[in-house]
Every structure is written in structure tokens, then in C-alpha cells.
């Protein structure tokens, strides 16, 4: 296990300086020098390393490798920027060590810096990524738990805390997540996907984390790099992995690059923006253009080269040095923090050739790892294009194992909230699974009941606890990797129409000392909230030990009369999952489903522990879900 003290010392050693000689004298002035990545590791799969070095006037100097065992300095590249240099090293067979570099001007050494190559943790390359055994719990950290009120504001950060404003920073942090780990473990969670924690030094709306202003620094209002590492290590002791939210498409307008670009092609539309900051090409959001065999180049460019907003400049992954920077940054965080996955934001908006390069580089380093991409569309064909193993007609290849299953999510919400009919309601949920034929591996998809961009599930279910239970059970017993959004288990709410980010990402009850309702202690929760929490906790913990749910064969029956039945089977374990949308009591004849009984004659409800004979009608008293574990 890495030592936090050791890593703190390494991070401190990256605060470097060098001397720049004035043109008219031998007077030297020390200037700040930064190197990214801050440090690296020996024995990585890709033996080449690119260093981005920043310092005033550094491009006019020479950089020479003074000391490095089995290390070769392959190239020192400059661009039109006077303040950036790219150094490429070959590290094949190089041991862990401290490298030394000289900064030279006219054959005079005017500065020096050291660079650390660390020893990797044992079996780092063999780490297992999140998979079907897991349940992912999505957290918006600013809105979850305020574990350290002292970091709510920071002198170097522009936006200050304002809990009264739903678009402001509220104070949740890494320490808060750490304090919640016992609750999350008891709930049955095995993975945490945390919305971005990197620095977002923006004037407003910085809480969500998607406007990165430093790719190697945790936002100080959340904590420090060392605190993030401690979170991952502590979560691991609870049997919980951590998935990093990564953005390779855009950054924050507050990034120092915007005042000092490393090259003249670092972001899309760079020259136009430099001449007039209002001259911005915004993305068309027409994501199918990059797959469409008939699309014209200009339409593709309008999509993948456009900005989201004026505060989110679009990074140019076609620039090879930018591409390498982003790839190395993703790998650095996996290796540094010991992550078990990456969730990649706005997946298709980045250059598609780069996405191949990026995903392959990560999976080459960690063959058993997992990446899930966000392609926000209801069309399975569009989503399937980006998954590893898909044989696309245009020859496009991806190495990203998983994608978010937006098509099945959309169908789930619609099928539960519309009336039952020949072509409405549960039949559409049944038929959507037939689209699995377009995916390379549908069981690797991540299915969710909601996320930070969608309205809250209980609100979408019109505050109907029966429909809520159906939706939760469907996600958690599906042949997918399930993901739930923080607070869903206690029925957090939002408006049900339109975009409602502030409400959707509301404060978790009990995350602040003054909260009157506390989900951790259940103080102040309504009877319905307690029932929902108990239902979710019971199902999640059952799922931990159920091979039928984790990897079992799925079978389902055409819905009839508002009832949809699925089964999951593995070895001696069979689950019969009965989704019932009827408001009135129903006696369900189980004979129709006997082909999946696997010789069993009775089943036990995994929630209420009651047993039922399978040769007698099953009385469904109310709307909801019944999950029977079938036994001989």
C-alpha cells in the first residue's frame, strides 16, 4: 500500500524552479516550473512517457537528461508557445528511480529538476474492474455529505459556498463520503461512481465538477489528492471500489491554458476564440453524424468540434500531444488512486479515432479493467456502435467494454408510467430486450434508475411506491451492471418535467448537521421512505450472494394483463421475478411459467420471507414486485 506521507513528499517535490537568464545580464530570476504528470511508474505497459513542462521562457532553453538508469530522452519538442516544452522519454526496462534533468542555456546549466519513477503496487495491472457482481452508487459529492466544513471555501477558489442556492456549492466533500462508507456498506453498495472531483475554479456553477481547471488536482473544496487516495483505500476495506468520472471532451474556461496555450491547436476553434472570445462554434449535439454513412464532414465537425458552452472549451484530441496528455492523465489516476473503473462523460463528443486510442491504451495497461461511456440516446444502434467487440460496417473499433444503457432506461420509465395496452406499457419493456441483438455484449452495459442529469425516480413514478419498487427491482435484477443514484433509496424527489439540475442533485438528508431528516439514522424519514430503504437494502444485500442475478440465464414471458414475469437461473438457484402494475388484487396462475421452475415446487419471497406453492395461484395483493427464490 502506498504511503500517504511518501506521496505527499513526492507531490511537494514537483514544486520546482529554474533560472532564466536575462538577455542583457548575468542576473538570474527564479521562475515557477511545473511538470505533468507529476510523477510516473516503472514497468508500465506503454514504455513511453510524455512530460508537459511549463515555465516562463522554457521553450528557449535546452532540457537534458542528466541521470536516469536505462532511460532514454527521445525528444524535446517545442510549439509556438514560449512557455511549454514536451519531453518524451523511453522507459523500457527502467527501474523505479529518481531522474535528474538539467535546464541549459548557451551551454550553461541554469536550472535542474528531479522526476520520480515509482514502484507499482503488486498486481496493479491485474486489477479487476467493476462488473456484474457489483452495484454502482452514484454520488454528486458537493451534495452528499459535508464531512469537513472548514474546506467549504478556499482562498484561491472563485466561487464560495451558498447552500441556499440550488446552483451553488453546498459543501459536500471527500471526508463526507468517507464518513458515509459504513452506511453504504450496510446498504449493499459495492462500487462508487463519484461525479468529478478535480479542480473547477469557475466563477459560478462549479459544484458539478464538469469544468476541469486542473487535471491533476482534486478541488480543495472537496479535499486533497491524498484524501482521495485515502478514500479509495478506506472504501476498499469495506469491499467498495471507486470509479472515476473522466472528461476528455471539454475542460473549464478557468484553466490556465486559456491564457497560455501549450500549442496553437490545443482546443477547437482556438484561433477564432483568441481573436474574439465571443466567436465560438457550439456543438450541434447531432451525435449520429459520426456514425452516419451519409453524413457530410461539416456536419460531423459541427458536432464533435463544437463547445458545450462558453465556459466549457472543447479540447482538440486530434492534436497528438493533447491526445497523449489526456490518455496519460486517465492512466495516472487509475494507477495513483487504485481505481476500479472509469465513467467517461459525453462519450461520442470527442474525436472518434482518439476514443479508440484512449480506450485501447487504458485496457492495454489494465486488461481486466472496465470503462463505461455515456452516450445519451434512446437508440440502441447508436449506443452499440461504441462498445468493444461491436463489428461496425464502417470498420470502427472501440475498446470500451461498457456503455450506459439509456435506451433501456428510457423504456423502463415510459413503460411503467403509461397505461397498459396492446402496444403500450410493459410490452415495450419486454420488446426492448430484443434489441440486445445489436450489442456485442449486452450484459456489460450499465443500467440505471437515474443519474445526475435525470429527474428523480420516485417523482417520475408519480410518488407510487409500487411502481418505484418495480423500477428498482428491474434495474437490480437485470442482466446488466446496475447503478443507482444517491438518495433514491430514501425517495429523494425533484420535478418530473424538464431539466431540474439543482433539485435532482439535492442535498442528501442527514449530510449536514442541521438537517432535520437523516437517512443515516432514519430520523425524520416517513414510513414510506423507511419501507423503500428497507426494500433496497434487502435486495442489494441478497444480490451480493446471488449468482442467479449476477450471471444467471435470463428468460422472460410476454406481459399479459399488466403482469410481466422474468426468471434468472444459475446452477441450483432460480429466481422468478413478477412485475405487477395492477391496482387491484390479482390471482396469478403460475402454470404458464413452469418451464423455468427447474423442478422446484415452491418459492420464497426474498423480501418478506414468505413461502408459496408453485402449483397454486399466487395472490398479488397490490402493485409492485414479487421475487421468488425457487427451491425443491
Image: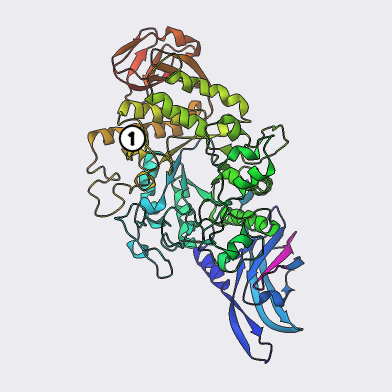
Residue placed at 35% from the left, 36% from the top?
A: 496
Q: Is residue 56 above or below residue 559?
A: below
Q: Residue at x 45, y 54 (%)?
A: 231
Q: Is the residue marked by circle 1 packed among few (<14), some (14-19), or many (20+) residues within 10 Å?
A: some
Residue 121 visible here: no
Indicate whether residue 549 is drawn in magenta. Answer: no
Residue at x 44%, y 28% (from the top left corner): 412
- Work out whether residue 49 or residue 454 is closer to the camera in this orientation and state it: 454
What residue did someone put label 1 on? 459
Which residue is more in the foreground, 158 or 474? 158
What scheme was used to colour the molecule? Answer: rainbow
Q: Position of residue 129 (x, y in %)?
A: 56, 43
Is 453 located above or below residue 567 in the figure? below
Q: Quadrant of the C terminus?
A: top left
Q: Quadrant of the N terminus?
A: bottom right
- The residue at the point 33 percent across, 17 percent down is 582
Please give the range of residues in magenta.
Answer: 78-94
Residue 90, magenta (yes or no) = yes
Q: Would you say 464 lies left or right of 324 here?
A: left
Tag count: 1
Percent of width and height locating residue 361: 67, 49
Decide if residue 214 is in sight here.
yes
Callout 1: SS = helix
Quick check: 585 left or right of 4?
Answer: left
Residue 14 spot, x, y in % from top left? 58, 71
**Residue 620 falls in image quadrant:** top left
Q: Position of residue 267 (x, y in %)?
A: 62, 58
| Left/right of residue 99 with respect to residue 415 in the rendered view | right
Q: Quadrant of residue 66?
A: bottom right
Amino acid at each position: 500500500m502506498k504511503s500517504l506521507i511518501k506521496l505527499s513528499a513526492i507531490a511537494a517535490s514537483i514544486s520546482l524552479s529554474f533560472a532564466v537568464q536575462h538577455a542583457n545580464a548575468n542576473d538570474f530570476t527564479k521562475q515557477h516550473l511545473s511538470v505533468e504528470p507529476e510523477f510516473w511508474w516503472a514497468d508500465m505497459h506503454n514504455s513511453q512517457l510524455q512530460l508537459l513542462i511549463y515555465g516562463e521562457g522554457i521553450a528557449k532553453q535546452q532540457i537534458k537528461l542528466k541521470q536516469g538508469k536505462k532511460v532514454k530522452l527521445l525528444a524535446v519538442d517545442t510549439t509556438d508557445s514560449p512557455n511549454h516544452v514536451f519531453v518524451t522519454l523511453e522507459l523500457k526496462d527502467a527501474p523505479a528511480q529518481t531522474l535528474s534533468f538539467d535546464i541549459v542555456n548557451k551551454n550553461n546549466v541554469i536550472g535542474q529538476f528531479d522526476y520520480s519513477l515509482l514502484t507499482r503496487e503488486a498486481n496493479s495491472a491485474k486489477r479487476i474492474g467493476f462488473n456484474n457482481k457489483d452495484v454502482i452508487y452514484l454520488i454528486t459529492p458537493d451534495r452528499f455529505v459535508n464531512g469537513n466544513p472548514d474546506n467549504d471555501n478556499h482562498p484561491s477558489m472563485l466561487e464560495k459556498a451558498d447552500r441556499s442556492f440550488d446552483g451553488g456549492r453546498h459543501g459536500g466533500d471527500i471526508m463526507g463520503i468517507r464518513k458515509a462508507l459504513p452506511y453504504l456498506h450496510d446498504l449493499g453498495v459495492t462500487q462508487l461512481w463519484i461525479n468529478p472531483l478535480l479542480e473547477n475554479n469557475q466563477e459560478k456553477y462549479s459544484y458539478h465538477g464538469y469544468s476541469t481547471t486542473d487535471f491533476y488536482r482534486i478541488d480543495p473544496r472537496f479535499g486533497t489528492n491524498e484524501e482521495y487516495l485515502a478514500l479509495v483505500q478506506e472504501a476498499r476495506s469495506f469491499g467498495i471500489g471507486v470509479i472515476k468520472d473522466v472528461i476528455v471532451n471539454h475542460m473549464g474556461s478557468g484553466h490556465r491554458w486559456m491564457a497560455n496555450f501549450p500549442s496553437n491547436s490545443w482546443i477547437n476553434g482556438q484561433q477564432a476564440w483568441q481573436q474574439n472570445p465571443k466567436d465560438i462554434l457550439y456543438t450541434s449535439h447531432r451525435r449520429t453524424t459520426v456514425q452516419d454513412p451519409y453524413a457530410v464532414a461539416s456536419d460531423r465537425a459541427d458536432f464533435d468540434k463544437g463547445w458545450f458552452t462558453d465556459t466549457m472549451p472543447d479540447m482538440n484530441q486530434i492534436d497528438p500531444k493533447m491526445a497523449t496528455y489526456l490518455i496519460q492523465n486517465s492512466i495516472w489516476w487509475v494507477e495513483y488512486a487504485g481505481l476500479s473503473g472509469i465513467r467517461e462523460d459525453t462519450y461520442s463528443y470527442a474525436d472518434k479515432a482518439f476514443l479508440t486510442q484512449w480506450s485501447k491504451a487504458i485496457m492495454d495497461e489494465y486488461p481486466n479493467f472496465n470503462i463505461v461511456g455515456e452516450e445519451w440516446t434512446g437508440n440502441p444502434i447508436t449506443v452499440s456502435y461504441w462498445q468493444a467487440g461491436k463489428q461496425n460496417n464502417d470498420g470502427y473499433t472501440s475498446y470500451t467494454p461498457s456503455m450506459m444503457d439509456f435506451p433501456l432506461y428510457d423504456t423502463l420509465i415510459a413503460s411503467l408510467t403509461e397505461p397498459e395496452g396492446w402496444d403500450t406499457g410493459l410490452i415495450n419493456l419486454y420488446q426492448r430486450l430484443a434489441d440486445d441483438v445489436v450489442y456485442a455484449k449486452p450484459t456489460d452495459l450499465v443500467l440505471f434508475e437515474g443519474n445526475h442529469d435525470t429527474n428523480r425516480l420516485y417523482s417520475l413514478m408519480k410518488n407510487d411506491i409500487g411502481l418505484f419498487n418495480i423500477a428498482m427491482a428491474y434495474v437490480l435484477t437485470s442482466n446488466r451492471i446496475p447503478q443507482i443514484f444517491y438518495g433514491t433509496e430514501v425517495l429523494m424527489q425533484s420535478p418530473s418535467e424538464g431539466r431540474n439540475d439543482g433539485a435532482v442533485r439535492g442535498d442528501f438528508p442527514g449530510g449536514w448537521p442541521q438537517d432535520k431528516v437523516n437517512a443515516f439514522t432514519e430520523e425524520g424519514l416517513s414510513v414510506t421512505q423507511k419501507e423503500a430503504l428497507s426494500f433496497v437494502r434487502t435486495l442489494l444485500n441478497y444480490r451480493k450472494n446471488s449468482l442467479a442475478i449476477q450471471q444467471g440465464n435470463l428468460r422472460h414471458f410476454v406481459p399479459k394483463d399488466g403482469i410481466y414475469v422474468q426468471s434468472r437461473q444459475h446452477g441450483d438457484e432460480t429466481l422468478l421475478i413478477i412485475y405487477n402494475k395492477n391496482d387491484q388484487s390479482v390471482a396469478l396462475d403460475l402454470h404458464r411459467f413452469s418451464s423455468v421452475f427447474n423442478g422446484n415446487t415452491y418459492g420464497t419471497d426474498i423480501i418478506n420471507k414468505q413461502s408459496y406453492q408453485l402449483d397454486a395461484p399466487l395472490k398479488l395483493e397490490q402493485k409492485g414486485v414479487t421475487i421468488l427464490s425457487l427451491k425443491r
